[in-house]
Image (tube, grey):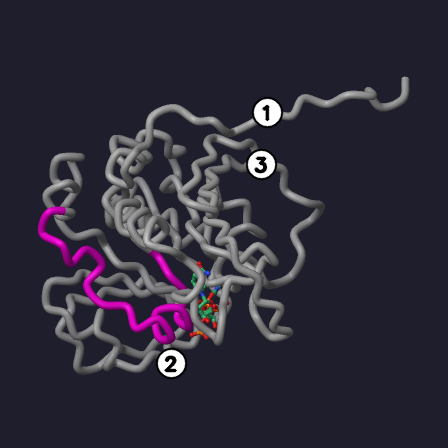
């Protein structure tokens, strides 16, 4: 048998009544989906229509207001928010949930007001003036292959250490679950950390905002950058939303 002559294409519009970002990212109960040995891991990224995750070296110019709102509301749905050392530094991470109303939303979801911040930094070459590390309200776990400590932090900082500079992220996630009670993790990139997680089969879902913009820059990063995973990873579409000309896709990895 050859390929079928027709495939099913579903029109995503017209859609039913509009939703706010608050309604979209509410009651997801991601921790309930976690396997016993590690947290459930979702990755949230924004890209241009030509697949770039940075414009002029930053993610900020890519997304629109809907992306920003979803970004913040997704932070209300997880025990921990994780990012690679370069993202934390370049994007100048601060307190993860600054809006008291969003901290209340977290508490209504049965979560702590502030999520645990998780920084992955093999070499621990982080500037300590990153606002997150200066924030006294923040609890931070640093996953690292270094024996060093970050000095002069006002945040409460703990370490999950590995003997190798390239950390086994499966072991680290297991420790996040067993030692810190983390059942759900939102990974906000960057592309290098995403690739490492994907290679180890540790990503459960991808939330991808596709901005109706073209960048074309030769040096801009894609949303995943690293050693290729074995074969392409298939995904199932969970939802597709639209705000203006931008798309918001939620995929579950197979
Ligand atoms: N479009 C978006 O949604 C989006 C989201 C996030 C970031 N970004 C952009 O992406 C760029 C940063 O991404 P990036 O790929 O360059 O860096 P990244 O993934 O943020 O951080 C890379 C660093 O994470 C650490 N790391 C990752 N995996 C590791 C492992 N298995 N073991 C040990 N350490 C590990 C290493 O830190 P050490 O070097 O300390 O060893 C590595 O250098 C920025 O320009 C940012 O603006 C875009």
Q: Are marks 2 and 3 in contact (CB under 8 Å)?
A: no
Locate the C terminus by quadrant. Answer: top right
Give the answer, above or below, for where 168 lies relative to 183: below
Residue 12 percent coordinates (x, y): 52, 29
Query: Which residue is at 89% across, 22% downward?
Result: 2
Q: Are marks 1 and 3 in contact (CB under 8 Å)?
A: no
Q: Is residue 218 visible?
A: yes
User: Camera-side residue: 23 or 164?
Assistant: 23
User: Camera-side residue: 187 or 34?
Assistant: 187
Q: Quickly name the residue at label 3.
A: 235
Relative to residue 110, is residue 65 drawn left or right?
right
Query: Which residue is at 60% across, 75% downward?
Result: 219
Element under label 2?
loop
Marks 2 and 3 sit apart, C-alpha to C-alpha, by 35 Å
Structural crowding at the residue carrying mark 2, measured as other residues with C-alpha within 10 Å and reported as few (<14), some (14–19) or many (≥20): few
Query: Any atom of ligand 1 within 8 Å of the CB at mark 2?
Result: yes
Q: Which residues are magenta?
A: 82-101
Magenta span includes 88: yes
Magenta span includes 217: no
Give the answer, above or below, for where 16 lies relative to 243: above
Residue 188 percent coordinates (x, y): 39, 56
Which badge, 2 or 3, is on the more N-terminal residue?
Answer: 2
Query: Which residue is at 68% across, 45% downward?
Result: 232
Locate the N terminus by quadrant. Answer: top right
Which badge, 1 or 3, is on the more N-terminal residue?
Answer: 1
User: Camera-side residue: 23 or 156?
Assistant: 23
User: Camera-side residue: 254 or 162?
Assistant: 254
What numbered label is drawn on residue 10? Answer: 1
Relative to residue 194, is residue 70 drawn left or right?
left
* Tag nearer the camera, 2 or 3: 3
Element under label 1?
loop
Q: Quickly name the residue at label 2.
A: 125
């Amino acid at each position: 048998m050859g390929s079928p002559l027709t495939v099913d294409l579903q029109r995503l519009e017209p859609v039913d009544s509009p939703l706010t970002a608050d309604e979209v990212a509410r009651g997801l109960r991601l921790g309930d989906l976690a396997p016993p040995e590690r947290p459930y891991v979702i990755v949230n990224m924004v890209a241009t229509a030509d697949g770039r995750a940075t414009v002029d070296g930053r993610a900020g110019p890519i997304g629109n207001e809907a992306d920003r709102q979803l970004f913040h509301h997704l932070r209300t749905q997880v025990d921990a928010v994780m990012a690679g050392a370069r993202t934390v530094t370049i994007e100048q991470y601060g307190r993860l949930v600054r809006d008291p109303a969003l901290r209340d939303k977290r508490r209504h979801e049965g979560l702590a007001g502030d999520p645990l911040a998780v920084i992955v930094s093999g070499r621990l070459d982080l500037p300590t003036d990153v606002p997150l590390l200066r924030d006294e309200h923040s609890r931070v776990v640093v996953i690292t292959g270094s024996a060093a400590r970050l000095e002069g932090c006002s945040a409460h900082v703990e370490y999950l250490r590995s003997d190798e500079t390239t950390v086994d992220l499966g072991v680290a996630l297991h420790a996040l679950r067993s030692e810190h009670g983390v059942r759900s993790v939102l990974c906000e990139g960057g592309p290098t950390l995403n690739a490492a997680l994907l290679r180890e089969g540790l990503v459960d879902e991808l939330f991808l905002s596709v901005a109706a913009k073209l960048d074309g820059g030769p040096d801009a990063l894609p949303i995943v950058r690293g050693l290729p995973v074995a074969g392409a990873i298939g995904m199932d579409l969970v939802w597709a939303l639209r705000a203006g000309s931008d798309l918001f896709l939620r995929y579950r990895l197979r």
